[in-house]
Image (spheres, rainbow, N blue to C red):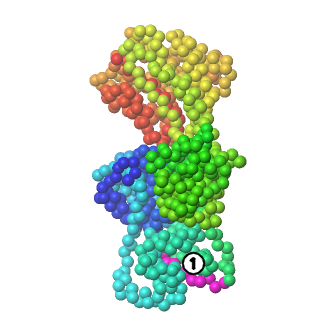
Amino acid sequence: MRNGGSVGFGGEEALDGALIATVRRTGALAGVVYLLSEAEPVLGLAAVCGMPLVAVAPWQRVAVSALGPLSEAVREDRLVWVGRQEDMARLYPHAAAGMPYQFALAFAPLHGARHWGALVLVWSGNHPPSLTRHEREHVLSSARRMTQVLDEAPGPWDIPDQPRAVPLRWPGPDAAQSGLAAADLVQRLPIGALSLDLEGRITYLNDAAARILGHKAERLLGTLPWQAVPWLDDPVHEENYRTVVFSRESVAYTALRPPDRWLDFRLYPSDSGISALISPHHDQRPTRATPAVTGRIHQLIHLAAALSQTVTVADVIHVVADRTLPAFGAQGMIISAADAGRLKIIGHRGYDPRVIARLDGLPLDTRLTPAGHILQSGIPAFFADPGEMARAYPQTLTISGKQAWAFLPLVVADRRVGCCALSYDHPHSFSAGDRAVLVSLGGLIAQAMDRALLYDAKHDLAHGLQQALLPVNLPAVPGLAVAARYLPAARGMDIGGDFYDLIRLGDTTAAAVIGDVQGHNITAAALMGQVRTAVHATAGAPPGDVLARTNQVLMDLETDLFVSCLYLHLDLAEQRLHLASAGHPPPLLRSPAPTPETRVIEVEPGPLLGIDTDARYPVTTAPLPPGALLALYTDGLVETPHTDITRSIAALAHHLTGSGDQPLDDLADHLVHALPHHTHTDDIALLLLHHG
């Protein structure tokens, strides 16, 4: 299992049993379980029942933030139903691009002791476009049963390295009496006949099929045909097979058996498997075009749709690794770029870190890898086996131990963005069609990578600016313990203008300030620095005057950005605080032990800074007894989609009350992570002040 943990066999067996029971009870064709990683906001394929793993390989890992029904069901914690392929295209166009099949789908979240993931059920395209109330209850009750299994498992659950194929054993009549007669019937047919189970394995074939496929029946039984017969490993077979699996509708097509023999294929699906008939195509040429790269085209469309949602370089690396490696049968990937005449590896998958460390930073003209030459020339290179690689780059074999490679230049408008290397653990031939599709793949990756590199450069500049403007260390004030946290928004968001500060005014007095500049860009970060400077310049004056003068500074700057701000004057000797607010969320005050209680300090807010030249900011006074704890925060901590902010503030107060006497730094970490990580859509600033 990935990320360091697995459950015992009993737990997996119980989950598999629940999945089989769910498929049977709901009348679905197949069921899939996704688990939510605890290490990152990603859903990973855990178990598949009723269809082969190859059919769902392109969706083995799905980001929680992705624009699709699976992610939406987990994010919004609700059942999502897609009754027709037309509905998928209308509601989720990015997901539909890679799923051109007729089917109906239900996505149910698995939410118990924690957010476990989701259950996906698949029906054929002839299912009515709507779920009946009875079917909906079956789906939801099945999800509850599966959640209970996850809650009661003896060990931690996480995404497995390889998803499990759970066999669906449908009860049926004893075939002993009719088996011989059926076998005789099929053997007499002049055409090839095969039977595949729901996992895609050959369970029966007649002599004619064995002759056409070119192997003895004993060798083929129990195997996956595209693995046992090399010429069946062609996208046209894969795409038509996947269509049958998803839609459960018959498919007929014509394909070439190399070098020059055309064959007619007819696939007939049912709830127990797929029957395939193969016969010679008697015309000189096939009667209709046979798209030899149909499957690859859909994979490119699917990848293009996923890449269109990427923002950062890390996003691109994850999408390429998660979608490209399974789609093209590769086991390794390295993406590199040029940096001051050297190779800089910016992403990889399927390689030992020691190999990456050896390759990173090599000169572009190195002979250890073709990557530098590919990056400079812009010409792709393919090596089908170690012999081909050894003739050009003999030292490469001693580094990684890979057996085949495709090096794809990442070029945008004649600019060399980088090089993407796909590698294989076994020799792999690249047909002309494969090479054309892989070169097109390189173009898609290049466009996304170019955009992501520019974004990351801008993001790093803004982030560096903001970090430089935030206080490195907060001053020591006798009798006051302080902890502060700044948490950037979820991956893919720009930098923002959240800020906090503590200003020592005397031995027993201090000023605390927290605020949020509108926007997520360099301008917001720069304005945040100007606001902090203005507050420092007037700190010590009454809180209302500090905000009024800071507001005047913003008005003079004639910026079109607004700022929320909360300013507090702390008088530890008098055990009182005075505060004023410019449209900022109110602070929380936890009373001292032994009966701590957290309440919201009701502050009469003034307008946001930067709106009205003549704005006035009323001052509120409140007690600050020894042992009290103040919590100042920005709205990123309490504002989540579809949630009332008042309830979120109440939940934060509840966390604060129940935190006990844990160290202030531990409490700060707990509070900024109190919400699920993937729901953070804004920066978070938190300032805790404890009057000792």
- In the rendering, at what x and y percent does residue 48 appear? 43, 62
Image point (39%, 33%), residue name:
670
Image point (65%, 48%), residue name:
376
Q: State the SS at label 1.
A: strand
Q: Is residue 647 above or below residue 429?
A: above
Q: Is residue 544 above or below residue 681?
A: above
Q: Which residues are magenta?
A: 271-283
Q: Is residue 60 above or below residue 514?
A: below
Furthest toward the right, the residue is: 413
Q: Quadrant of residue 615?
A: top right
Image point (52%, 46%), residue name:
359
Q: Is residue 349 left or right of residue 662?
A: right
Give the quarter of the figure containing the C terminus: top left
Does 477 appear in magenta?
no
- Which residue is denoted by mark 1 in the rendering? 265
Q: Is residue 597 left or right of residue 683?
A: left
**Identity, as a three-letter code, of the amino acid under mark 1:** Phe
Image point (69%, 46%), residue name:
415
